[in-house]
Amino acid sequence: MPIRLKKFIGMLALVALVIVYALVSTAIAVAHLADSSAVVHLAFYLFSGLLWVLPAMLIIKWMEGKPREGRR
């Protein structure tokens, strides 16, 4: 797969990941944290704010991977 195509697909995947993750995280917070204290809100948003980095790292690692030798 050409590197430019790989980076384009990865960029679309990252944008989709951030949008979907933000919507899901917000929906979970609204549904389950309505009556919780500020400390619980802070802990949830700190955890969920950092959790999206793991799948994003995998996408970026895939984007930056070297093409295989012998395949084009």
Image (spheres, grey):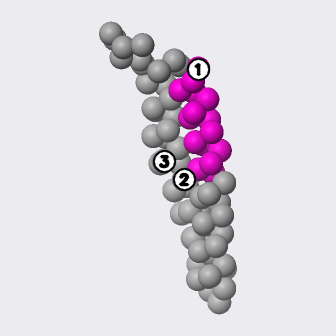
Q: Residue furthest bottom?
A: 35
**Residue at image point 49% right, 38% down:** 59
- Magenta segment's dominant SS is helix
Q: Residue furthest left?
A: 70
Left/right placement of residue 11 relative to residue 55 reads: right
Instruction: Say what secondary structure mark 2 lies in.
Output: loop
Eye-nearest disc, 2 or 1: 1
Numbered-mark total: 3
**Residue at image point 56% right, 35% down:** 10
- Please, is residue 4 above or below residue 29 in the view? above
Location of mark 2 (residue) = 52
Q: Position of residue 57 (x, y in %)?
A: 49, 40
Instruction: Say what secondary structure mark 3 lies in.
Output: helix
Asked whether residue 6 is drawn in magenta, I would say: yes
Residue 28 falls in image quadrant? bottom right
Location of mark 3 (residue) = 55
Location of mark 1 (residue) = 4
Q: Amino acid type of disc 2?
A: Trp
Q: Amino acid type of disc 3?
A: Pro
Q: Nearer the viewer, residue 43 or 14?
A: 14
Q: Are marks 2 and 3 in contact (CB under 8 Å)?
A: yes
**Residue at image point 62% right, 39% down:** 12
For the residues labelled 3 and 1, the Cα–Cα distance comes to 21 Å
Boundaries of the magenta span: 4-18
On-image quarter of the C terminus? top left
Q: Amino acid type of disc 1?
A: Arg
For the residues labelled 2 and 3, the Cα–Cα distance comes to 6 Å
Left/right placement of residue 49 relative to residue 72 reads: right
Q: Are marks 3 and 1 in contact (CB under 8 Å)?
A: no
Crowding at mark 1 (Cα within 10 Å: few <14, some 14-19, many 20+): few
